[in-house]
Amino acid sequence: MRIRELRIENFRKFRQPLHLTGFEDGLNLVCEQNEAGKSTVLEALRAVLFERHGSRSDRIRSFRPHGDEVAPTIEVGFDLGDANWRLRKRFLQNPSVELEGPTGRATGDEAEERLQTLLGFARAGNRGADDDSRGALGLLWVEQGQSFVLGTPGQGARRTLEEVLAGEVGAVTGGQRTTTVLQAIERSLADYQTPTGRPTRRLLEAQEAAASAAEDARAAQAELEQFDSVLERLEAKRNEQRRLVAELDDREQQQKLTQLEADLDRARTAGQALRTAEALLREATGERGRLESRESSRRELRTQVAQADQGATTARSAAADHDPVLEAARQSEKDATAALESARTALRTAEERRLVVQRGQAAQARQRALAAAFLRLDAAENIATTLQARRDELTANRMTADAHSELLNLEQTVAEAQAAASAGAAVLSVELLPSAPAARLNGAAVEGGLRVLVSEPQSLELDGFGTVSVTPPASGEPAQARLRAAEQDLAAFLADVGCATPLAAKEAAQAHRDATQASALLAAQLKAACPEDAALGIGAGLESLRGALASETRPGASATPKDGAAGAEDVDDAWQMARTAEREAEGRRQAALDTLQDAQITNVKLTNQVERTAAEVSRLGEQLTADLEAMDDDALAAALDAAKTDEARAILARDEAKRAVEGLDEAALLQRRDALRKRRERLVNDRLGLVGEIAQLEERAKALGGAGPATRAAAAAELAEAAAATHDRLKEEAEVLSLLAETIRDAQRETARRFLAPITQRVAPFIGRLLPNASIVFGEDLRPTLLTRGGRKEATDDLSKGTQEQLAVLTRIAFADLLIEKGKPASLMLDDALVFADDDRFEVMLEILAEAAQRMQIIILSCRTSAYRGLEAKRLLLA
Amino acid sequence: MRFIHTSDWQLGKPFGRAPEQARAALLEARLDAIDALAAAARREGAGFVLVAGDVFDSPEPGDRIYRQALTRMKAASDIRWVLLPGNHDPARADGLWSRLASEAPDTVIVCLEPLPIELAEGYWLLPAPLQYKRTQDDPTAWFDHAETPDGAKRIGLAHGPIRDFGSSTAAANLIAPDRARRAALGYLALGDWHGRREIDALTHYSGTPEPDDFDREVSGVALRVDLAGETPDVVQVGIGRYHWMSESWSVASGGELDGLLANLAPGIERQHLVLRLRLSGLLTLAERVALRDRLESELAHEVRWLDLNLDDLYARPTDADLADIDASGVLRVAAERLQALSATEDAAGRRAVAALERLYVEQRRADRLEAR
């Protein structure tokens, strides 16, 4: 489609007619300033084609210039293929339409309809044309501010495009129908499950119903089982009750009990009889025992009486036998005492005599001791005199042991000094021949030869020859000095001790040692001569002896100790004999005393025995007498016989009673009877309990049975089965619907992909030039939805406004290309498009538009003169 | 002596598998059978109705069923009802029967003991009540030695299968087939078998008066028995309301349906028909949809309960079917895919078949919507 000319009158700002001519096939550029009316031109074009001439909509009214009641009129000339068409519409006042073309002229609705068919748009609604009604041209003629809208093409446009696409790919989307069917299916499916596949509504209800029915069935079954168990229990209880009643009514049991009672009575009676017999027997036995023991104790008593008599007799004779013994003892004691007295007297006499003798002996002994002491004193005085002489001698001799030691030391020192002096001195040796003249050394003649140590200057005079002098060297002087000193010390010592030579000194020393030894010997002799004398009370030592004897007179030799000694011995012997005799007498008296005492004790004992046995005899005799008085022997024997008879009888009676009791065990009978009674009591109680239980169970059975548990259980089971089946069926239906919906959606996706391929292919080169490595994906509604750049996907809504606009323009070029290829009317009209494009993109877009212009008419309306300056296009002016 | 011989009322049978509405109606119909039996007795001049066991569906049918039964029998006070416990409602202690025995009016005779009962002058009833669901002994064995006055007519009343019925499972409560002869019975009224069956001239199963399942032989009747003659005069009396039918139709084209429907259960009112219908065959998708639509939206509402099974009615979508769905668009692609999926016999295949059919239905619905 190509616009050739346009005439506008009374339309918006164009009150005066505007006549635009000179539109060319390719690019047409209307570059005018703002407010020049570019958009009005586009609006007029859209109005004349798409608005119905008779419409009085608000939009149509807005076409009128402000304040004028005029008729907006538009006339357009266009080519379709080779045919020229002219369309004129007048709005509001005397509205009219006129279409003129190769097939002739049409007016009114006919013209409108022909126009719609011709250009492929729909009749506008009451409110005027819209995107849906305008069709493909409406999509391609982009109004100001709409160029960047990446919207879904309107219904009309889409239908046209879809038709074209279907022709190209041999497929149709089914479009609305598919949507309708899919929606219906999805609505149905929504009754079963949520989009995520969870059960909902009907399916959920069915599922819940199935679960609840299953639960009901279980509950009903449980109830039925409970009911059955109640009935079973009831029957069991009934049976038990029957058994109980039968047992309670059992006559045999009754008889048994009666029999037991009777047996028990008999047993009790027999038992009582036995106990009585046993008591009687015990009594008889006791009586017999008592009598027997009396008899035996009487026998015993008699024996005791006899024995007591015997004892008493024995005691009396023993006492009598003892009297002489006592008397003899008394006499012996008297005799012994007298003997003792006489012995004591003799002893005293002997003692007196012995004392006299002893005093005499003592005086003699002193005299003898005194004489001896004087003798000792004499000897001691001699020794003391000699000792004193020796001691004086010692005092005179100064060569003590110490002095002797010193002498030896001094001699040693001289010898050592001499040796030292000789060692350092020259030796003068002279050998004289026998023919030699006389020679003198230091004036002393030399015979034969000599040898001298030269410690002093030596002068050897040889007659006829002269004198040879030898002087000792100075080096021997110190040794010579020491020798001299030592010799002086020795000389001084000797002088001190008063000895001429060392030899004399040594002899003196020997004399000193001898004197010392002699003194010591004498001192010891002196000590021995003066021992201690105990008899005279003299201490040891010469001085004590001298002192003690100073006052005593040396006794003479007058005493005759021989007589005195002999008389003393006799006296002593006599005293000893007297002492022995006294001791003997005392011993005898003591023995006599002891014997007497023993005899007296025995006497007392025997007397007591006699009294005691007599009392015993008396007591036992009285006892026997009393017993016999109570019952004499004959009576006792008779009573014992009677008691024995009684006992025998009692034994017989007891044995009989015992036999009667045998076979009648009262305790066992009692036990059996009580057991039987208890059992009956229990039975009665049990029966009562059972009656209650049965009543309860009956009531329960009635209550439970009223609900019809078996029927309910059967019904519930069937219902559960049906509910499960329904649930399964619905589940299957949901599956079917799900499968169907999924299959349709799959088909839709695939078809859409195939269907949109022509557009995608056509737009691809443009996109590639504008955005290298980018491609665009269209939605089923022909809307560009995704831009893929280097593998990255971006929703077109998220792109920048500039990019969105550029994509929208490129898409429209592709649509227009497609329409033109399929012989549909198409041209592109852009009002103030590409306002957001940067310089580079703008240039690319212009290149693409220029190329597209070789295939279609493109009309660009813009206020940016300079931007399009380089574009090769037919430029049109509104003035 | 005339009486009505009936059995297997099974009052309270739940019919849990039926839809709720049908369930209630079927339940009620069994109670109504009592009234119908009373009417039949009056019509036939029979003073007694002998029920040969299974009066109730279970030993505890619930108060409502119990009361309804009792009320209806009380209402027909001109009839004497003789009730026998069967295997469904055995006379166990303390259950339903003791309650019934104590609450029933004189006109209702409850047979709880195997003892002869004189029904009328010279007519003695020998009942064989079941104490348990299953017993190994023949409950009628005692008939042979039952003492009745000389010349009396003996009527046996029992519940259980005849020994040689051929069912291997029914080993309990077996009844000797020649019991009537051996026990010198004038008539042996039997229950348990829900279809009416004559064993010999003296021995009859009446069947249930109100049918309760598909595939029975004659059922829904009672027997009017007259013992005046040498042999009993037994006449079948219709009682039941609902007819249970089980049909299997094989169809080759949608057009056959009209004929089949026209010949369905002649003489039976549709509202009294309980129908189990199984269709098999191979149709086009369009035909199958149309046929199903007709059965589900027409027949199903005409009859009491339609138990419809179309599992074996296969649809083979034709090109026309597919074209109906869509000439070439998305839906066509979807239809072709589903058809490909349906090639298998398994669950997934059946699911695909159903989905395709649904697509067809939806498409046609959309067509109708658009046409409006």
Image: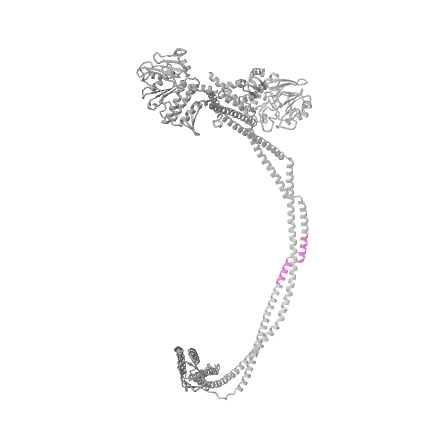
x, y percentage for residue B313?
56, 20
Q: Quadrant of the N terminus of chain B?
A: top right
Boundaries of the magenta span:
A618-644
Is residue A639 covered in magenta? Answer: yes
Q: Position of residue B72 (x, y in %)?
A: 56, 21
Q: Which residue appears at 48% of the width and 28% of the height?
A: A196
Prevailing secondary structure of the magenta residues: helix
Q: Position of residue B167 (x, y in %)?
A: 64, 25
Give the residue at x 66% y 59%.
A299
Of residues A412 and B115, the one nearer the viewer is: A412
Q: For this rendering, which residue is in front, A432 or A770?
A: A432
Residue B62 appears in the picture as rendered:
no
Q: Is residue A290 above or below residue A403?
A: above
Residue projecting furthest to the left: A67
Residue A854 visible within the image:
yes
Q: Nearer the viewer, residue A576 or A400?
A: A400
Residue A660 lies in quadrant: top right
Rendered location of residue A792, percent (x, y): 43, 30
- Give the colour scheme of this rendering: one colour
Name which quarter of the figure residue B141 lies in.
top right
Q: Is residue A429 magenta?
A: no
Count of labels shown?
Answer: 0
Residue A517 placement, left or right of A16: right
